[in-house]
Amino acid sequence: MNAFAGFIRKEFFHIFRDKRSMYVLFGLPIVQLMLFGYAIRNELNHADLAVWDRSGDAVTRELTSRIFASGTFRMAGVVRHESEIDPLFKSGRARQIVVFEPDFENRLMREGTAHVGLITDASDPNQAQILQAAVGAIVADVKPNMRVSVRMLYNPQLRSTNLFVPGLIAIILMLVNALMTSISITREKELGTMEALLASPLPPIQILIGKVIPYLALSMVNVSTVLVVANVVFDVPFVGSLPLFFMEAVLFTMTALSLGILISTKAKTQQVAMFVALGGLLLPTILLSGFIFPVENMAIPLQVVSNIVPARWFLEIVRGIMLKGNGLAELWEETLILAVMTVAFIAISLKNFKIRLE
Amino acid sequence: MRTLKFLIRKEFLQIFRNKAMLPILFVMPLVQLLILVHAASLDIKRIPVMVRDNDASEASRAVIRSIEASDLLDLRDVVSDAPSVDRALQNGDVTLAVVIPPGFERDKLRGSPPEIQILADAVDGLSANLAVNYVLGTIGATEPGRIRIDGRYRYNPTLNDDNYMVPGILVLLVTMIGGFLSAMNVVREREIGTMEQLNVTPIRKTEFIIAKLFPFWVIGLLELGFGLFIGWVVFGLESQGSLWLIFAAAMIYLCAILGFGLLISTMADTQQQAMLVAWFVMVVFILMSGLFTPVASMPQWAQVVTWFNPVMWFIDFMRRVMLVGAGFADVWPTFVVLTGFALGLNALAVARVR
């Protein structure tokens, strides 16, 4: 046991001696959180609109000022002829043109209906739809003839920070741990020091545990920092149980670490390990986990694929605990899936782990 | 010149000898392209909905029928008690619940607007908003509005997400491959100790760097070509603008990215360190690139920050050329900016190579 403790201490020294990596490991979560807190939004903000008012009467002017009164949209210019539309889109100066048909007010009075055309640059289909819906809702009153009260639960101000912070925790834990373990083990292989370790009296399993324990500790520090900054600076609520949250975080970190070990048993060089761990995990973890784009919106085959992305399950757990106040009663399925994944990764790694020289 | 030729050949041999790297460099990015372009969608497919009907009248059943008839709404259950609604929302079984209070029909018959309540799981605020608007539209579809909206979607009339994501994801994959490869390369020679051997040879610094980066530049362009080909064959995405223009910009862009990788490589002591730093910068680049969340949604100062992000420039360029059909006259500023990045980053990196 003494040898084991010594080995862990050595691993800690190894990691903390490298100042530059330390800055990145501890700085990255903060910088990302700042970006998500201050800069990155998915809601509509300052969309550029141009108006082609072919009627120019009191009603159309009223509608135009109503659109821009909300402050969500910026006036990108006035269109006078059809030929002016294309250049506006091509140069990216406007995202949408609002067209009022000629004789707007008279038609509305006499025939009871008048038409507003919304021509939207749909090269970004997501934004186009949101824009279409938002402007449409201002121009035409889409509410039915009822007294509607809408309650937005769990995130009443609809802030995207509340959505992104849990995702950020998942991404940081997954990538830092998988990357660092896989590289640090292949590094020993590449430099030839792995043989020295294997020849030592420590059993291989203790070598692996010793390798990953510093990262587990580091991850918990990172998670705590993110939680505190998110809560203090950005007012992201934490409704559920903190101990449960940390238990789940440890579980997920172990999933990521065991995935890193699995990669390292297959990879011969650091380059291969890092390309698999980063190139192979970065985009799927961002895109298939529901971090930014909801899993429910994906096509069915893709939803099936997303099931094997561990971050997807952890994301549901974190959002459940932080925003909804869920407990194990609601989250046992996700927890079980992560546990099974971890055990599977470790089992495959142990099978692949070579303690003999080739 | 002759030395350069031999050096480049040596680097190519070294890359192609490594059997584990080749599939990673070519197969992995393309598989990701195939799968991931479908993932980035805010387009609501099916919203699981629950109704709590406390009126149990003809009018409330009409509301339920309109929800049932909708393609986008998936009516999971009709209940009459509050706890089961709470539980379903809490569990995430439904994202939206419509509550019809008692007296709904009575109010409607009397001519006073009846009351209705909508509870939405707003963890994802944007999606929640779209869903609420959609439910309101469905329920109120029978009442005619006075102003009709005709929506027209330009450049992508079917609102196909794939078309939008292909250029962006492609840029990202090319950037990751180029950036990571060059970030690891020089530091690898140093870590293994072969850098010193190279130092004692008569090879000049610029020759050494050009020979190191040239293969990655070729790989990056090939990767882009493959990606465009796959986008065309699989997703039927044909570039509206000129392919020459795309490749001309890509050549400059790759120089910038490789220069960035090289700069990281010269600053790092170990491959692990280089990787971490490259990853850190790459994540910031990706998040601030407008690929997943629009740059226009950012506050003004953050939009200014994105001007210093080459990835943002190239993604914007690719989208405008491929999807909107912009020509050189529309996008020449991108060329100026990318050339600036390429010269600046490489100059910095070369100055740091010892």
Image (tube, coloured by chain):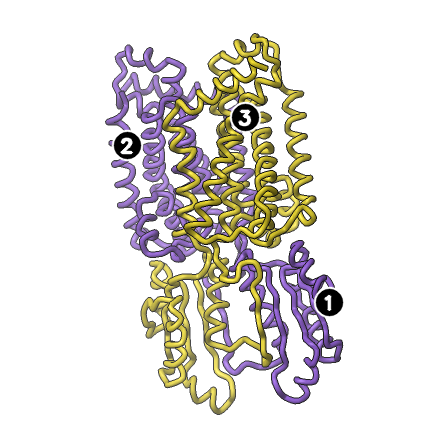
Chain colours: A yellow, B purple
Q: Secondary structure at mark 3?
A: helix
Q: Are marks 1 and 3 in contact (CB under 8 Å)?
A: no
Asked whether the residues under marks 1 and 2 belong to the same chain, the reply is: yes
At which x and y percent is residue B221? 41, 36
> Circle 2 sits on which residue?
B346
- Between B116 and A329, the residue placed more toward the observer is A329
Residue plotted at (65% across, 69% down): B98
At which x and y percent is residue A87? 34, 63
Question: Going by the image, does B60 lie left or right of B180?
Answer: right
- Between A323 and B150, the residue placed more toward the observer is A323
For marks 2 and 3, give the CA distance. Answer: 39 Å
Q: Are marks 2 and 3 in contact (CB under 8 Å)?
A: no
> Circle 1 sits on which residue?
B81
Q: Earlier in the sequence, mark 1 or mark 2?
A: 1
At which x and y percent is residue A212? 54, 25
Q: Secondary structure at mark 2?
A: helix
**Quarter of the image where the N terminus of chain B is located:** top left
* Image mark 3: chain: A
Tag 1: amino acid: Asp
Is residue A356 positioned above or below A319 on the image?
above
At which x and y percent is residue B100? 68, 74
Q: Residues within 10 Å of mark 1 (few under 14, many from 20)?
A: few
Q: Is residue A184 visible in this depiction of the protein?
A: yes
Residue plotted at (41% across, 86% down): A103
Tag 3: amino acid: Ile
For marks 1 and 2, give the CA distance. Answer: 67 Å
Residue plotted at (48% across, 64% down): B153
> Circle 3 sits on which residue?
A213
